[in-house]
Image (spheres, rainbow, N blue to C red):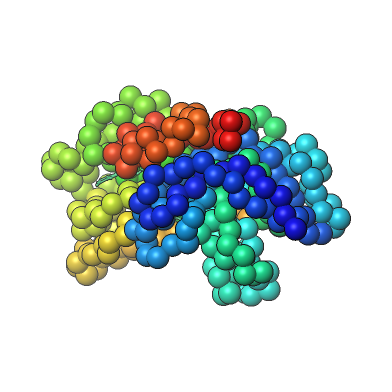
Amino acid sequence: MSTTTHAIAAPAPGAPLEQTTIQRRDLRPEDVLIDIAYAGICHSDIHQAQEDWGTAIFPMVPGHEIAGVVAAVGSNVTQYRVGDRVGVGCMVDSCGECEYCQAGTEQFCVKGNVQTYNGVGFDGENTYGGYSKQIVVKDAFVCRIPEGVELDVAAPLLCAGITTYSPLRQWGAGPGKKVAVVGLGGLGHMAVKLAVAMGAEVTVLSQSLKKQEDGKRLGATGYYATGDESTFDVLSGTFDLILNTVSAKLPIDSYLGLLRVGGAMVNVGAPGEPLSYNAFSLLAGNKTLAGSMIGGIAQTQEMLDFCAEHGIGAEIETISAEQVNTAYERVANSDVRYRFVIDTATIGS
Ligand code: NAP
Ligand code: ZN
């Protein structure tokens, strides 16, 4: 038993996305049915639709930045009611019992978290993401979108927001800390807003100075072009924390040179090809090179509440279903300011 909903899918690796219909399961006791209002386009959607990260499941309905309204709830759901404004990010299930789930880091579930799309549920069914009109999700993987944050600008918080909030918190972004954000795209622009709100002194390192005015408007006090070699001399030894949001391979050693002694560079960007570094780039200065993957559900709720408190939403360009393929090309060309969000009312019409 299931219901049919309209969606946008990639039929095969690298193929243009097209409109289709998919099935959503009938509600189980813990399930929430969500009428999706907006779905953000994350660069990870493009990586997976192109199989940059390896074999993927097709047809693929991407989308893990989901904002909408509760349309129905299962018999055991007490936290959510019809009409509530909610969001869903990159995960829709995990075992709930392992040490990582118990610690609120479901993304590291030893049984593997169930991805919102390009995943397989514990019931053996493929998962389909947010580029659709409705989704059914277990209540424990649904977050509440606070009043004051509109659904369209909230959608990207569910991935771009938490993916940058989590490492900024873990690595102590705050007053007295100099933070560099590499790449001013979907994740990068959220990182700037969040780090500024946390009280850090923020610098953007972008390929060029094209988006400098935007960077300053978002709260960055420094803005440098990495295409200009002198940037790496001028900023040598400057930062406590560098957050790398770039979707492509970067010369890591050059960036490690920008850290102060004891500083950390955290990669959230996920290019398909390996990154490399010279051991001495870390040794000389007791530096750390780290990674960070999304964030747990409790921290995602914390991030949403933080955004509401600080008046933070994503900077978006709203598109219709038929503009998705053009949006993919623009994201791939770093031509996004700063997140495309699909108005799901345009799907199936
Ligand atoms: P995006 O909107 O495309 O932003 C990436 C930015 O990186 C671009 O806007 C561009 O900024 C810069 N860039 C692109 N190509 C570059 C190149 N060849 N050299 C230098 N800079 C380049 O992508 P996104 O949605 O923010 O995602 C960024 C990456 O994070 C992707 O790889 C995605 O898969 C990954 N991701 C990881 C997680 C996680 O859990 N760790 C979660 C979500 C996404 P400038 O124009 O300013 O240079
Ligand atoms: Zn994402």
Report the residue that reaches farthest toward the right.
75
Quadrant position of residue 35:
top right
Q: In which quarter of the image is the N terminus?
A: bottom right
Which of the two residues, 37 or 153, is positioned nearer the viewer here? 37
Q: Where is residue 299 in the image (x, y as percent from the top left)?
A: 61, 53
Which of the two residues, 309 or 49, is positioned nearer the viewer here? 49
Q: Position of residue 163 (x, y in %)?
A: 48, 51
Q: Residue at 62% of width from left, 58% of height from top?
A: 92
Q: Position of residue 48 (x, y in %)?
A: 41, 55
Image position of 29 with respect to 35: above or below = below
Image position of 71 with respect to 209: above or below = below
Image position of 2 with respect to 334: above or below = below
The answer to whether residue 31 is seen in the rendering is no
Say left or right for 259 vs 168. Answer: left
Say left or right for 258 vs 315. Answer: left
Q: Where is residue 77 in the image (x, y as percent from the top left)?
A: 82, 54
Q: Residue at 40% of width from left, 65% of height from top?
A: 55
Image position of 299 with respect to 99: above or below = above
Q: In which quarter of the image is the C terminus?
A: top right
Which of the two residues, 153 or 51, is positioned nearer the viewer here? 51
Which of the two residues, 148 or 338, is positioned nearer the viewer here? 338
Say left or right for 169 vs 187. Answer: right
Quadrant position of residue 213:
top left
The answer to whether residue 323 is seen in the rendering is yes
Q: Residue at 36% of width from left, 31% of height from top?
A: 215
Q: Residue at 37% of width from left, 65% of height from top?
A: 54
